[in-house]
Amino acid sequence: MIHLVTGGAGFIGSHLTRELVKHEHDVIVFDDLSLGNIRYLDDALTGGFCTFMKVNCANLAHFRAAVDQALDGRNAQAIWHFAANSDIPAGIVDPIVDLQHTFMTTFNALQLMKEFNIPEFHFSSSSAIYGDFGHALIDESSGPCLPISNYGAMKLASEGQVCATLEGHGQKASIFRFPNVIGVPATHGVILDFVKKLRADKNCLRVLGDGTQQKAYLHVDDLISGMLFIVEAGQSKINLYNIGPCDDGVTVRFIAETVRDSVAPDAEIIYGCEDRGWVGDVPRFRYATAKLAELGWQPSMSSEAAVHRAVREIAHDICNF
Amino acid sequence: MIHLVTGGAGFIGSHLTRELVKHEHDVIVFDDLSLGNIRYLDDALTGGFCTFMKVNCANLAHFRAAVDQALDGRNAQAIWHFAANSDIPAGIVDPIVDLQHTFMTTFNALQLMKEFNIPEFHFSSSSAIYGDFGHALIDESSGPCLPISNYGAMKLASEGQVCATLEGHGQKASIFRFPNVIGVPATHGVILDFVKKLRADKNCLRVLGDGTQQKAYLHVDDLISGMLFIVEAGQSKINLYNIGPCDDGVTVRFIAETVRDSVAPDAEIIYGCEDRGWVGDVPRFRYATAKLAELGWQPSMSSEAAVHRAVREIAHDICNF
């Protein structure tokens, strides 16, 4: 069984690739290495099950040529589409970034799914599609979706295009809506930011916002486990699930203190005044995961446990750079 | 007050333009005339309040130049974005059609809203964003949206981009989600199809599908009235409303019989076997309009009354061609 993984050299994609290879699937990774790193795939590439193609999936002609060359007449079972601009603030500055890297990559991957007769499409969507629901619990049927970042808008656009395409082509799709995912190799995010800041200045950690923003955090190991479960157990044509911890998340203050305790215990933490860090940031977030629990899966770690583990991993990882 | 209307030479856009001109607003219409027709604007163009620019809004450079030339340094109050591929089946064949004409036109209009500091954005979305909810009543908070046509997907994508853009720019946006809109000048749709078929063959009307598909139909006069009401009365930053009749709609069978009675009373109607006409067609449809009723507006016509009137108008219109 051949699996195509776009963005497979990125944070989440490389974990998935490793897991698929572990199960002795043939995996072909497509990545432009703009945010990913071939180094993340070192162990996956050694066993002979994994092929790497450097390509920008936003360019359909290049992407098509890479798939054609890699498949060489063989049939693929699934596209796992993880290529995206994962740097939300960068996409706020210029909406073309998310148009190209978050949406057009999806549009093109779906075109190639049709052209190469690939039966399954598994898509990493995001809790960013929902927008700001305040204190309300967000489940899969919550609406209307009013995303406040270009990233969220282009993930929502991608979901729509997945559904429309599956109406006439392919057998089965998954849409995974997940919140902040943490672990190593961290390419962006609040933990990495804090670790970097504290390594630059051991005495002081300046935090954007007042630290009260509260969000759910999922460890990447749980995410991979959840996605593989959905692909196996989901019986619908479109299997759409929130994947997240079974709690209301932790505050930025908790994360700042955890990083401080781990990296520079004597540092002073200085907070801003706003209840959100930057335009496009949702200040609070309550995420319902009952649908996936009903299907039979739940994460092994709470938000708190995930943050504790990720802080250790990231602090360790960054020391070894 | 200057209003920019994209797709202003189309079916709905030309009605809106006429209404804005009637209220002595300056209106600048942008249309590529691929589905619209300058003839629809004849009366609007005579009074000196309306300017027409022939441009493809999917081409940002051309669109920007047209806006720049037409505004000539003046400020605009609002963009009414109606340009889209309204031919859903055409978009099923090639998703690039809706990508370009339904989504990229929106993306570009939002870019120009920012560049020209235009405070308001009013967007014609669609009930097609919802997908197939079966017999469930669809209100504005229904989800998840799983559109089954590329048109629906790209309208959903557009909604997302409107929300994300308004987070950092502009003052107010409207998102109008409406079902099938009928009236003249009809450019597409089931009534026009039936009228044309019966004028080609007075003895027989062949209907795709078994005629049981039931949908809500809104007369274009009611739509214009509803949109103008929302723009005036809506107090949110994003004013998102279903606009539709207060009923569960009428069947294709009812429409076929109404057209037959009006155009060729002796014709035999022959139905197909499927419960939907073509891929991307939603077989049934129940549309909640309580939110707009609460704001203070309801349509003057039921689906039945709207169909009766539109059949008369279209049959009359087509005779005068």
Image (cartoon, coloured by chain):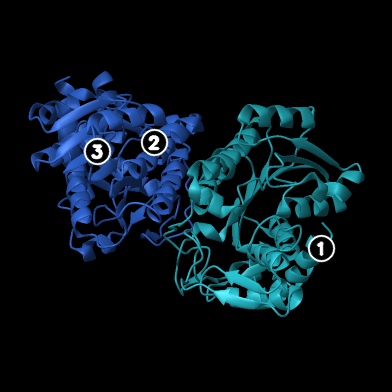
Chain colours: A blue, B cyan
Foreground residue among A7 and A60 = A60
How far across and down, in percent of the image, does residue B90 sit? Answer: 55, 50
Is disc 3 placed on a helix, strand or loop? strand
How far separated are the C-alphas under marks 3 and 2?
13 Å
Horizontal side of A19 relative to B190 (left or right) equals left
Please report the residue visible at 21 percent of the width from the left and 24 percent of the height from the top.
A38
The reply to whether callout 1 and callout 2 are in contact (CB within 8 Å) is no
How far separated are the C-alphas under marks 1 and 3?
56 Å
B197 in relation to A217, above or below: below
How far separated are the C-alphas under marks 1 and 2?
48 Å
Q: Quadrant of residue A101?
A: top left
Placement of the N terminus of chain A among the 4 image quadrants: top left
Q: Quadrant of residue A182?
A: top left
How far across and down, in percent of the image, does residue B194 sit? Answer: 66, 67
Residue kind at label 3, given as amino acid type: Leu
Is residue B24 shown to the viewer in this render?
no
Residue kind at label 1, given as amino acid type: Cys
Q: Chain of mark 2?
A: A
Is disc 1 placed on a helix, strand or loop? helix
Residue kind at label 2, given as amino acid type: Thr
Is residue B190 shown to the viewer in this render?
yes
Foreground residue among B217 and B175 = B217
B98 in relation to B206, above or below: above
Q: Which residue is mark 2?
A: A105
Which marked residue is nearer to the observer: mark 3 or mark 2? Answer: 3
Q: Which residue is mark 3?
A: A4
B51 in relation to B204, above or below: above
Q: Which residue is mark 1?
A: B319
The reply to whether callout 3 and callout 2 are in contact (CB within 8 Å) is no
Horizontal side of A121 relative to B307 (left or right) equals left
Please report the residue visible at 27 percent of the width from the left and 19 percent of the height from the top.
A200
Which marked residue is nearer to the observer: mark 1 or mark 2? Answer: 1
